């Protein structure tokens, strides 16, 4: 039973060695261990703070990026709208100019057609007059070849003149 019931001297020496071990550990081991643990905690806290700052900075950058994208889209929409308006104005102006030119050309064409028509009518009148004279000349030649026909025609013309 020696193992179960230790001797008082052994208890005292074991207790003394244990207390001495605690003092030595406290003096040489616990302070450096506590110091290392505290440094580790501080570095972890700093890393967490830096990570939080980085996260907030990333969030700020993301929101700024979204603002920039929205501004760019608004600017793009504005430029597209202005471009479309300018295009519409240019098309309308070109259409008006084209209509003006077409109307001017129509007017000039109508004048030219009227002038050509007048010239053609004058030519037709001249040709008709020449043709009428030529026909009358031929008829008179054929009618006046004979002296008896000439006398008869003169009498008829005189009768017509008296009646009028």
Image (cartoon, rainbow, N blue to C red):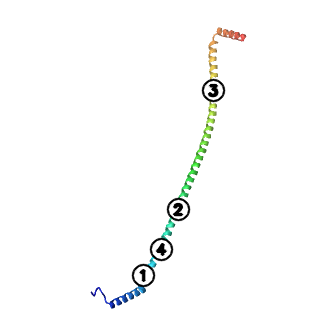
Would you place residue 84 above or below residue 34 in this image? above
Q: CA distance from mark 3 to mark 1?
A: 128 Å
Q: Residue 63's mark?
A: 2
Q: Is 153 rendered above or below residue 68?
A: above
Q: Residue 132, how many percent across, how many down? A: 63, 19
Q: Are marks 4 and 1 in contact (CB under 8 Å)?
A: no
In the image, which is nearer the foreground, mark 3 or mark 1?
1
Residue at position x 54%, y 56% from top?
73
Within 10 angstroms of label 3, few (less than 14), some, or many (20 or more) residues? few
Task: Give the mark nearest the N terminus, 4 or 2.
Answer: 4
Q: List the residue tagged with mark 4.
A: 45
For disc 1, the marked residue is 33
In the drawing, does residue 123 fall left or right of residue 45? right
Camera-side mark, 1 or 2:
1
First reached walking from the N terminus: tag 4 or tag 1: 1
Of the numbered discs 3 and 2, the one sitting upstream in the chain is 2
Q: How far separated are the C-alphas under marks 4 and 2? A: 27 Å
Name the secondary structure under disc 4.
helix
């Amino acid at each position: 039973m020696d193992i179960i019931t230790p001797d008082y001297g052994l208890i005292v020496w074991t207790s003394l060695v244990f207390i001495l071990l605690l003092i030595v550990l406290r003096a040489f081991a616990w302070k450096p261990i506590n110091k290392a643990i505290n440094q580790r905690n501080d570095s972890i806290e700093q890393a967490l703070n830096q990570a939080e700052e980085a996260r907030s900075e990333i969030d700020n950058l993301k929101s700024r990026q979204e603002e920039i994208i929205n501004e760019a889209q608004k600017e793009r929409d504005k430029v597209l709208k202005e471009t479309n308006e300018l295009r519409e104005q240019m098309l309308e102006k070109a259409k008006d100019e084209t209509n003006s030119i077409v109307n001017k050309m129509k007017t000039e064409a109508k004048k030219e057609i009227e002038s050509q028509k007048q010239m053609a009518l004058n030519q037709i009148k001249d040709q008709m007059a020449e043709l009428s004279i030529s026909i009358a000349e031929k008829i008179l030649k054929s009618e006046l070849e004979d002296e008896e026909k000439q006398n008869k025609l003169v009498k008829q013309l005189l009768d017509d003149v008296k009646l009028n």
